[in-house]
Amino acid sequence: MNSIRTGSAFIAFAILTAAPLNAAILTGSVAPPPGSVNLTTEGNLDWIHWGLSAATDVNRKVTGLSQISNFTTIGAGTSVVRLTDSASKYSWIDGTPTAIVTNTPGGVYINNFDGPGRGFMFTVPADLLSRVLKVYVGEFTASGTLQAILSDNSAPAYSQVLTGAASQTVQGVYTINYAAASVGQTLTVKWTETADLGNNDNITMQAAALALPIVPEPTTLALLPGLIVLSLLRRRM
């Protein structure tokens, strides 16, 4: 019995360690955001929120080491204004300079109202470690596109449109799973307006959260060797 357990554990270890550690990942999806977002919970590595009380306000995870950069604007002459009525609200209990916030509707938006090409850009660190980045955005009478690019180009760039509607506000949360093929890299995220659907078109950005992916619970890990052996036996049959 002990030899079977030892063999199972060895097979599991071999399979888990056989996968290349430098395999790059860059995938994503977009969905409607929840009505209330707890950034402390979502960003176990780091989080950032823009526009708490003014367009220039930036709040961060106090222990996050500023891994998520502040944004820069895309497009000549692009100007930024505070958003005051986000349908998705944001809370945290580990922030700086404001330590605790509950359900703020704040954010920022591009207010040039003159068509596609303007937006926001920021970066997060990338290396062999898999991370999950969530970006909370919106748009009014416009469609925007989020693009993510690894600095070592070790995986194809991710790009996806958040389809808007004329005279309507649409919000989304992009979830990006990524890892680079080498250390010391960055992931650059761009959120730009790509379709003008009417007067006063604009795009918004509220927050971003960076986290390690959820790992299996100990009970799941305990079952893993047996499951792998069972899978191998079925393949042989």
Image (tube, rainbow, N blue to C red):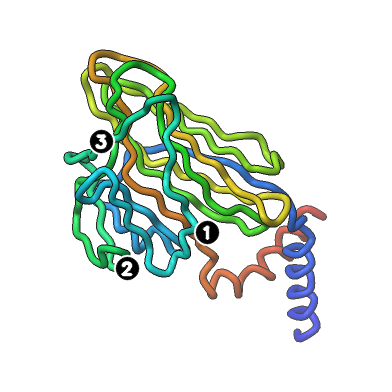
- 40 with respect to 168 (left or right): right
Q: Nearer the viewer, mark 3 or mark 1?
A: 3
- Crowding around mark 3 (Cα neighbors within 10 Å: few <14, some 14 to 19, many 20+) is some
The image quadrant where one finds the C terminus is: bottom right
- 173 with respect to 232 (left or right): left
Tell me the tag on residue 81.
3
Residue kind at label 3, given as amino acid type: Val
- In the image as oriented, which residue stretches furthest toward the front? 77
Q: Residue at x 46, y 55 (%)?
A: 210
Q: Is residue 169 above or below residue 132?
A: above
Secondary element at tag 3 = strand
Q: Is residue 148 above or below residue 24?
A: above
Q: Residue at x 25, y 36 (%)?
A: 81
- Crowding around mark 1 (Cα neighbors within 10 Å: few <14, some 14 to 19, many 20+) is few
Query: Marks 3/1: CA distance?
Result: 33 Å
Which x, y percent locates residue 164?
32, 23
Query: Marks 1/2: CA distance?
Result: 20 Å
Q: Which residue is mark 2?
A: 94
| Image quadrant assignment for residue 97 | bottom left
Residue kind at label 1, given as amino acid type: Pro
The image quadrant where one finds the N terminus is: bottom right
Dots 3, 2 in contact, CB < 8 A: no
Secondary element at tag 2 = loop
Q: Nearer the viewer, mark 1 or mark 2?
A: 2
- 126 with respect to 113 (left or right): right
Sequence-wise first label, 1 or 2: 2
Q: Which residue is mark 1?
A: 213
